[in-house]
Image (cartoon, helix red, strand yellow):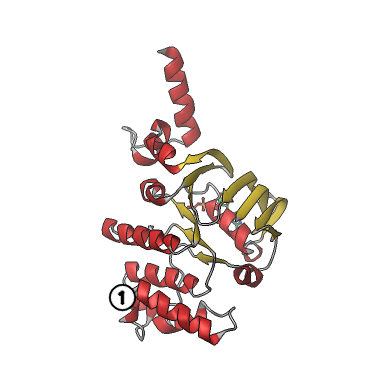
Amino acid sequence: MLSVSNLEVVYDDVVLVLRGLSIEVPAGGIVALLGANGAGKTTLLRAVTGLLVPHRGRITKGTVRFDGTDITGADPAQVVRRGVAQVMEARRIFAEMTVDENLRAGAHTRRSRVEVKESYARVLDLFPILASRRRSTAGYLSGGEQQMLAIGRALMAAPRLLLLDEPSLGLAPKLVEQVRDIVAQINAQGMSVLLVEQNAVMALSIADHGYVLEVGAVVRDGPAAELMADDDIREFYLGAPADGSRRSFAEVKSYRRKKRWSA
Ligand code: ATP
């Protein structure tokens, strides 16, 4: 469904951030994109949604295809209309607006009032907490509620592919579980999902396939269950080194290789 091929992205015409990155999201699948801070995860999402321009970024090589159509460099409204919606990192909701207004804003690219009404009912069904807070100012919602609102707003565009940028960021474990269950539920209704996460356990527990990103390139990919069971990935993403330092995935890998050879 989404096919990113050999993508290169440059900021300010000089900073090369994505270096020939390729990923695939199949129809109906959940794909996890893992990687440390600065690996290029958000940049990849911006490249897909057409949001590089306001950040002075540019695709210099490669292609982005959605449902077989080339959408490389397409503008954001066009991408949304084609069926891709993004839930922003840090829950960028409109804090001054009500829950209701936030949700309706998510449907701004749609024409049919009847369909928008249907989506609205479906979103409130999925998030009963939002139904009871429809008239509340969004900025006063709790962190978890704001995350639900951010997801709900993206769903109002009736996407076929949902991009989520670190939905578990800053949430208590119980809420992370809730968000995970919601994503699984949305996927079960037929929506494809690209899930960007630093919380590898959360992401891999619902994903079919995962990619590990480092310095703008994919260093590893495979079925989610395989990545979850992988010692190197466990050490980097799930375990904290004794000295408190956090090594890169590539370092952990070469260290383990050396250890095997010297044994
Ligand atoms: P994080 O989880 O911290 O958001 P990330 O994997 O999403 O990390 P990106 O936000 O895509 O990574 O950033 C990748 C690299 O690109 C970083 O080195 C960052 O400093 C740089 N970068 C991001 N946006 C810009 C910009 N507008 N101009 C210049 N460099 C940028």
Image x and y of residue 9, in percent: 66, 51
Using residue 113 as the reference point, say whether residue 140 is left or right of it. left
Query: Dot 1, how many residues are within 10 Å of its Cα: few (below 14), some (14-19), or many (20+)?
Result: few
Q: Is residue 194 above or below residue 227?
A: below
Please report the residue visible at 43 percent of the width from the left and 37 percent of the height from the top: 226
Q: Is residue 187 above or below residue 123?
A: above
Image x and y of residue 250, in percent: 50, 33
Image x and y of residue 229, in percent: 38, 35
Q: Nearer the viewer, residue 5 or 214?
A: 5
Q: Secondary structure at mark 1?
A: helix
Please report the residue visible at 46 percent of the width from the left and 74 percent of the height from the top: 153
Q: Nearer the viewer, residue 64 or 197?
A: 64
Q: Quadrant of residue 170?
A: bottom left
Instruction: Please state, as top left, top right, bottom left or bottom right, where the N terminus lies in the image.
Output: bottom right
Tell me how many marks there are: 1
Q: Is residue 255 above or below residue 74?
A: above
Using residue 178 as the reference point, say whether residue 30 is left or right of it. right
The amino acid at mark 1 is Ile
Q: Is residue 160 above or below residue 134?
A: above
Please report the residue visible at 59 percent of the width from the left and 67 percent of the height from the top: 83
Image x and y of residue 23, in percent: 59, 47
Q: Nearer the viewer, residue 45 or 27?
A: 27
Q: Mark 1 highlights which residue? A: 129
Q: Nearer the viewer, residue 96 or 178?
A: 178
The answer to whether residue 154 of the structure is visible from this angle is yes
Q: Is mark 1 within 8 Å of ligand 1?
A: no
